[in-house]
Image (cartoon, helix red, strand yellow):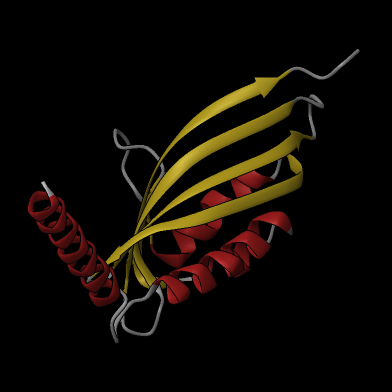
Amino acid sequence: MKHAIRKLTFVFGAASLLLSGIALAADGPGLTRDKVAAWLEVYEEAWETLDADKAAALFTEDATYRDNPYADPYQGRRGIREYWTMVTSDQRDVDFSYEVLSVSGNTGIAHWHSEFTQKSSGSGVVLDGIFVLEFTPDSLCRTLKEWWHLQVNPAEE
């Protein structure tokens, strides 16, 4: 029995070392969790201040921004700026948070959460989503794909 326990301990220990090595390799010299988090920090500032120019500056000139898998993506910084100007025009008191889930190659995946109030109705909006972000070596986003769920809480009378 002791032999079986030692063998099982060795197997779990080896698996743990292997998995930690894979996690370290994913954060190698290219894209890292810290770089994705730094990008998301600026994204957070842009959204919370409703700054479409700051948001657009996070992307390459030829970037694509896909907020809906069934619609054409917004194209380039200009398209992203126009999209952001439109969608944030009815928002106030935005609170955005995120967690970097994974980094592999030049792609980062993050879970994000946002809450804000609609200016027009006073309703509270809660969004919860996932980003898949493809980056260039200079930490600009080339491709953004997102999936999210929405909850609207009507304004109190």
Q: Nearer the viewer, residue 72 or 49?
A: 49
Q: Quadrant of residue 47?
A: bottom right
Q: Is residue 153 left or right of residue 29?
A: right
Q: How many numbered circles does the render carry?
A: 0
117 versus 112 height, above or below: above
Q: Quadrant of residue 44?
A: bottom right
Please tell me which residue is depicted at 80% across the width and 35% down the height of the picture.
119
Residue closest to the far right = 157
Please tell me which residue is depicted at 31% across the width and 43% down the height of the picture.
72
Q: Quadrant of residue 144?
A: bottom left
Find residue 36 and report its horizontal and vertical position in percent: 44, 69
Q: Nearer the viewer, residue 108 or 5?
A: 5
149 versus 105 height, above or below: above
115 versus 140 height, above or below: above
> Visible in this render: residue 57?
no
Q: Nearer the viewer, residue 107 or 86?
A: 107
**Rendered-image quadrant of the C terminus:** top right
Residue closest to the far front = 2
> Visible in this render: residue 70?
yes
Find residue 79 and report its horizontal and vertical position in percent: 45, 57
Q: Is residue 81 left or right of residue 100?
A: right
Q: Is residue 153 left or right of residue 54?
A: right
Residue closest to the far top = 157
Q: Is residue 15 left or right of residue 89?
A: left
Find residue 11 and report its horizontal and vertical position in percent: 12, 58
Please tell me which residue is depicted at 76% across the width and 35% down the height of the picture.
117
Please tell me which residue is depicted at 70% across the width and 44% down the height of the picture.
89
119 versus 89 height, above or below: above
Find residue 113 and report its horizontal and vertical position in percent: 57, 43
